[in-house]
Amino acid sequence: MTTTLRPSGPLQQNADGARARSYDVCDNGRPVGAVSISTDDAFGASAGVVRSLSVDEARRPR
């Protein structure tokens, strides 16, 4: 099983410099979930935070 992240949309950048992006979580090339990552307001652009993570157990082969 190979797990990869594929961008599911463009990089979002706010006027204050904050950035965010969503990704598909793929297992052997098939989407099985989603993750959203963004910069952390407290630490600026040098640190990130996972805003959401979901994996659909029914779509995983194992």
Image (tube, grey):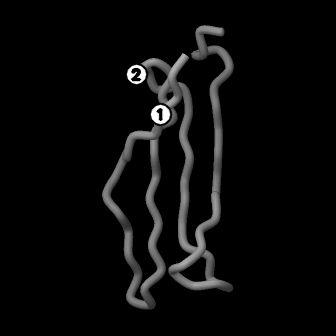
Read off the residue under disc 2. Answer: 29
Q: Which corner quadrant holds the C terminus?
A: top right
Percent of width and height locating residue 14: 41, 81
Residue 42 versus residue 37 in the image, above or below: below
Q: Residue at x 38, y 88 (%)?
A: 15
Give the crowd class for mark 1: few <14, some 14-19, many >=20 residues within 10 Å: some
Residue at image point 65% right, 38% down: 54
Residue visible at 47% across and 66% down in the picture: 20
In this rendering, is residue 37 above or below 23? below
Left or right side of 25 for 14: left
* Mark 1 vs 2, N-terminal side: 1
Residue at disc 1, secondary structure: strand
Tell which of 21 and 1 is nearer to you.
Answer: 1
The residue closer to the viewer here, 18 or 48, is: 48
Disc 1 designates what residue? Answer: 4
Look at the numbered discs 1 and 2 and tell me whether their residues touch, using CB distance below 8 Å: yes
Q: Amino acid at mark 2?
A: Gly
Q: Which mark is residue 38?
A: none
Residue 3 point in image, percent of width and height: 52, 28
Question: Which element carries disc 2, helix, strand or loop?
Answer: loop
Quadrant hosting residue 10: bottom left
Q: Is residue 56 left or right of residue 24?
A: right
Residue 48 appears left or right of 2 = right
Q: Hey, which residue is sitting farthest top in the picture?
A: 61
Q: Position of residue 38 (x, y in %)?
A: 54, 66
Quadrant holding the N terminus: top right
Graded by Cα atoms within 10 Å as few (under 14), some (14 to 19) or many (20 or more), the crowding at tag 2 reads few
Amino acid type at image mark 1: Thr
Residue at the image point whose x is 59% and y is 74% from the top: 47
Mark 1 → mark 2, Cα distance in angstroms: 8 Å
